[in-house]
């Protein structure tokens, strides 16, 4: 049994006890029955009124609870719809009082959520509007009366964050551009003369509208100022270059240059004006010393001609260079020519440097060739010969590669510019081929001279006998002595010097030709026989073998001191255009020449 039911039973018992007690009192007092009845009616009425009031109150409470439940249900349904959440699910088998409490609590919670969402929406709208005003963007139409969903609030927050980032980036860009504009204006000594420039430089940064149009206008203004600054810097640098050139041409001493050094940096208006004044002063001084200036320019012209590998015809084409009439017009012609040559050299600088490198390598190659023909090169001390051999081997690899690289680069340049690249008045590869041909002809001439010298020496030895040579003594060795008389060996090879072969340059073998010596006892008989015209066995043998004694197309006859013109037995018919072709052809010629000499030597001995 519930406690409330127990308590109700106790109330009924108390009421019965009270009525019984009242009856006992009435009995003792002696109140008549009618009065007892009246008094009992009064008690009943009071009890009934009290219970009725209590029941009415409770009924009213029940009605209020039901009404509250109905109101909460309706409001809760509306809130769920506005907040776009799932409807509230009522619990089954719950009392009216608990249901009303649950509904009321849920309604209060959803009211709070609605309020918070609307407040956040309002705050975000204010922030967005502020950012849009700063960025000069149109306002965004948003229904402030409706309750935003969570997704809508999320998107709104992201939009505001994006606007804030845009504002910060534009603010940073604006500040940076503003600093650069102020620096440029200070450098140019320019004061803001338009309303936009004043808004940028003079007004507060926070008041500036960070629109895309304003940022673009800022960038345009900065570019204009930077362009003007660059023009001033270029003008000032040109004036400084002109001043330095005039200093050098006029040979201005250092003590006169020092006062001007203060304006040799910067590009402000006062510095530019000072530079112009200095140029005007130097130009006036140049006109006063026009002859000296023109001669200085001619020295510079000659240097550029050398650097550009100008031929003599190209140099003579500039007629004012040779004029003696030192006028202002002549000076202007020289100035224009030096500017043209300087630009020409700058355009072809890489190619000219490559040609210069080839020239240096070619001169080194010719120097090695000259040293290779020097008989005293084997008497060196300190390992110079070994060092030369290493450098020569390195040059043999680098020179052909350099020629091929230059050839490819020049061909590409000629295709791009549709003109020929000229060195010393001719195409570079033709120039290289000509140098190789001249070198080949020089080697042929030296070879013929050696052969002619050897021929004359052999003829003299056949006529008068050779001069005995004392062998050099070495430690630990004794010269061999022989009582027998030597017989004549053979004729010499192409050169009597041990280093006249081409081995040091191209890696061939050295062919040493033994000197022919006639015995002292036989020298007279040979001379007498040859002079008298009698046919001695020795003379007959010499005449029989005269065809075998034909060296390079010349007959070695002892009866004719004057020899016929010397002819070379090997020739390089084709013109070598590169180092590799020259080396290959000269090696073949060397081998054929050495073979013919060995055959001639064998015939003479036989």
Image (cartoon, rainbow, N blue to C red):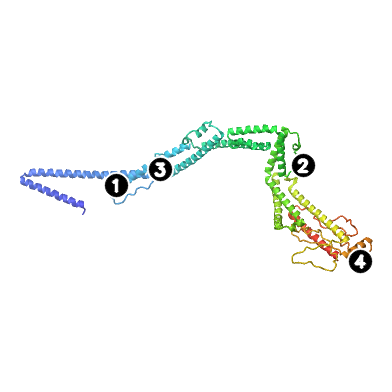
Q: Residue at x 24, y 43 (%)?
A: 60
Mark 1 is surrounded, within 10 Å at the Cα level, by few (under 14), some (14 to 19) or many (20 or more) other residues, namely some
Question: What is the x, y in percent for residue 357?
Answer: 70, 49
Are the two marked residues, 1 and 4, in contact with CB atoms closer than 8 angstroms?
A: no
Q: CA gap, disc 3 to disc 1? A: 27 Å
Q: Secondary structure at mark 1?
A: helix
Which picture quadrant has residue 285?
Answer: top right
Q: Closer to the N terminus: mark 3 or mark 4?
A: 3
Question: What is the x, y in percent for residue 311?
Answer: 75, 43
Residue 537 — which label? 4
Which picture quadrant has residue 265?
Answer: top right
Which residue does the numbered mark 3 point to in the structure image? 148
Q: Closer to the N terminus: mark 2 or mark 4?
A: 2
Q: CA gap, disc 2 to disc 4? A: 66 Å
Are the two marked residues, 2 and 4, in contact with CB atoms closer than 8 angstroms?
A: no
Q: CA gap, disc 1 to disc 4? A: 159 Å
Q: Is residue 284 above or below residue 548?
A: above
Q: Secondary structure at mark 3?
A: loop
Q: Nearer the viewer, mark 3 or mark 2?
A: 2
Q: Closer to the N terminus: mark 3 or mark 1?
A: 1
Q: Nearer the viewer, mark 1 or mark 2?
A: 2
Q: Is residue 92 above or below residue 247?
A: below
Q: Closer to the N terminus: mark 1 or mark 4?
A: 1
Residue 369 — which label? none
Which residue does the numbered mark 1 point to in the structure image? 101
Q: Nearer the viewer, mark 1 or mark 4?
A: 4
Front residue of 545/97: it is 545
Mark 2 is surrounded, within 10 Å at the Cα level, by few (under 14), some (14 to 19) or many (20 or more) other residues, namely few
Which residue does the numbered mark 2 point to in the structure image? 313
Mark 3 is surrounded, within 10 Å at the Cα level, by few (under 14), some (14 to 19) or many (20 or more) other residues, namely many
Q: CA gap, disc 3 to disc 4? A: 139 Å
Are the two marked residues, 3 and 1, in contact with CB atoms closer than 8 angstroms?
A: no
């Amino acid at each position: 049994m519930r406690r409330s039911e127990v308590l109700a039973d106790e109330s009924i018992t108390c009421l019965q006890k009270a009525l019984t007690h009242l009856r006992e009192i009435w009995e003792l007092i002696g109140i008549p029955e009618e009065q007892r009845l009246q008094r009992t009616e009064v008690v009943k009425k009071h009890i009934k009124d009290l219970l009725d009031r209590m029941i009415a109150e409770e009924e009213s409470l029940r009605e209020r609870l039901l009404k509250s439940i109905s109101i909460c249900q309706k409001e809760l349904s509306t809130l769920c719809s506005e907040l776009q959440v799932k409807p509230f699910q009522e619990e089954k088998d719950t009392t009216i009082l608990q249901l009303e409490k649950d509904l009321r609590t849920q309604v209060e919670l959803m009211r709070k959520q609605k309020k918070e969402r609307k407040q956040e929406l309002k705050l975000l709208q204010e922030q967005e509007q502020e950012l849009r005003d700063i960025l000069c963007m149109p306002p965004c139409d948003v229904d402030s009366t409706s309750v935003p969903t969570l997704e809508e609030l999320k998107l709104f927050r992201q939009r505001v964050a994006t606007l804030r980032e845009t504002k910060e980036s534009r603010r940073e860009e604006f500040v940076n551009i503003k600093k650069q504009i102020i620096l440029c204006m200070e450098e140019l000594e320019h004061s803001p003369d338009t309303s936009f420039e004043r808004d940028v430089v003079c007004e507060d940064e926070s008041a500036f509208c960070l629109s895309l149009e304003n940022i673009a206008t800022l960038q345009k203004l900065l570019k204009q100022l930077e362009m003007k600054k660059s023009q001033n810097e270029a003008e000032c640098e040109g004036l400084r270059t002109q001043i330095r050139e005039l200093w050098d041409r006029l040979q201005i001493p250092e003590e006169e240059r020092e006062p001007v050094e203060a304006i040799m940096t910067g590009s402000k208006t006062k510095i530019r004006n000072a530079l112009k004044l200095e140029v005007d002063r130097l130009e006036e001084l140049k006109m006063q010393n026009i002859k000296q200036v023109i001669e200085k320019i001619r020295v510079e012209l000659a240097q550029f001609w050398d650097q550009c590998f100008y031929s003599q015809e190209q140099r003579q084409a500039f007629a004012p260079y040779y004029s003696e009439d030192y006028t202002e017009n002549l000076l202007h012609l020289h100035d224009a020519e030096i500017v043209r040559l300087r630009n020409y050299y700058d355009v072809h600088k890489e190619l000219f440097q490559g040609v210069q490198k080839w020239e240096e390598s070619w001169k080194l190659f010719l120097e090695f060739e000259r040293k290779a023909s020097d008989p005293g090169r084997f008497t060196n001390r300190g390992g110079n010969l070994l060092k030369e051999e290493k450098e020569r081997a390195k040059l043999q690899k680098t020179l052909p590669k350099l020629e091929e690289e230059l050839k490819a680069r020049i061909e590409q340049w000629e295709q791009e510019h549709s003109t020929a690249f000229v060195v010393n008045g001719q195409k570079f590869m033709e120039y290289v081929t000509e140098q190789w041909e001249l070198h080949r002809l020089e080697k042929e001439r030296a070879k013929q001279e050696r052969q002619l010298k050897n021929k004359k020496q052999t003829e003299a030895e056949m006529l008068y006998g050779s001069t005995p040579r004392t062998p050099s003594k070495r430690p630990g060795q004794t010269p061999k002595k022989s009582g027998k008389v030597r017989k004549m060996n053979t004729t010499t090879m192409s050169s009597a010097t041990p280093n006249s072969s081409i081995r040091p340059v191209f890696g061939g073998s050295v062919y040493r030709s033994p000197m022919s010596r006639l015995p002292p006892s036989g020298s007279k008989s040979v001379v007498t026989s040859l002079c008298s015209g009698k046919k001695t066995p020795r003379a007959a043998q010499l005449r029989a073998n005269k065809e075998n004694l034909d060296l390079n197309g010349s007959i070695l006859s002892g009866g004719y001191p004057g020899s016929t013109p010397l002819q070379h037995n090997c020739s390089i018919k084709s013109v070598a255009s590169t180092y590799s072709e020259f080396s290959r052809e000269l090696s073949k010629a060397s081998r054929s020449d050495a073979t013919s000499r060995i055959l001639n030597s064998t015939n003479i001995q036989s």
